[in-house]
């Protein structure tokens, strides 16, 4: 039954593999540097909104569908939060992720991370005043 699948053929030489490789967009060196800089700016902006107890990290990698960017926040307690990006390849080289979007994502990540702490603590903290 192997002949009925798009994966039939010699190892490493399949119709599906050939189609998938052709459909994956690639970034130029300048776009890769810009994407890394944009993602680092999001991480830095997110750090500005949060206390030092929160860990913020970013990564740019080649995914199955092309380049992918990730910014993640690990709060002191609670679940981590993250934002994934697929860069806009038609954008100007200096702005793979637009400035407004970078700021919005940083605020959203910081708010989500703070909410994770609040939900993890729930009623475990006694108010200092009434």
Image: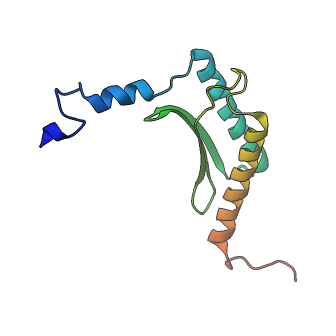
In which quadrant of the rendered image does the C terminus lie? Answer: bottom right
How is colour applied across the structure in the image? rainbow
Q: Residue furthest front?
A: 4
Q: Farthest left residue?
A: 1
Query: Is 39 placed above or below 117 here?
Result: above
Q: In the image, 16: left or right of 87?
A: left
Residue 80 percent location from the top left of the image: 58, 55
Query: Which quadrant holds residue 32?
Result: top right
Looking at the image, residue 89 lies above or below residue 128: above
Q: Quadrant of residue 117?
A: bottom right
Residue at left offset 61%, top offset 32%? 87
Drawn side of residue 8 relative to residue 80, left or right: left
Whole-percent x and y of residue 74? 60, 52
Horizontal and vertical percent for residue 129?
87, 80
**Badge count:** 0
Q: Residue at x 17, y 40 (%)?
A: 4
Instruction: State the residue lying farthest toward the right.
Output: 130
Which quadrant of the rendered structure holds the N terminus? top left
> Residue, x 68% and y 26% (percent of image)?
91
Q: Residue furthest bottom?
A: 130
Q: Nearer the viewer, residue 33 or 57?
A: 33
Tell me where residue 11 sits by quadrant. Answer: top left
From the top left corner, tell me how far across and down residue 24 is, in percent. 45, 28
Tell me what residue is drawn at x 73 percent, y 39 percent.
Answer: 102
């Amino acid at each position: 039954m192997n002949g009925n699948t798009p994966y039939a053929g010699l190892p490493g030489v399949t119709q599906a593999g050939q189609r998938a490789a052709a459909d994956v967009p690639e970034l130029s060196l300048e776009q890769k540097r810009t994407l890394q800089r944009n993602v680092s700016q999001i991480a830095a902006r997110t750090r500005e909104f949060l206390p030092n107890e929160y860990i913020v990290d970013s990564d740019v990698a080649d995914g199955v569908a092309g380049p992918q960017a990730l910014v993640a926040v690990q709060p002191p307690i609670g679940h981590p939060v993250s934002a994934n990006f697929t860069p806009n390849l038609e954008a100007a080289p200096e702005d793979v992720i637009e400035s407004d979007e970078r700021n919005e994502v940083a605020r959203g990540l910081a708010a989500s991370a703070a909410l994770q702490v609040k939900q993890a603590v729930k009623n475990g903290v006694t108010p200092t005043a009434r």
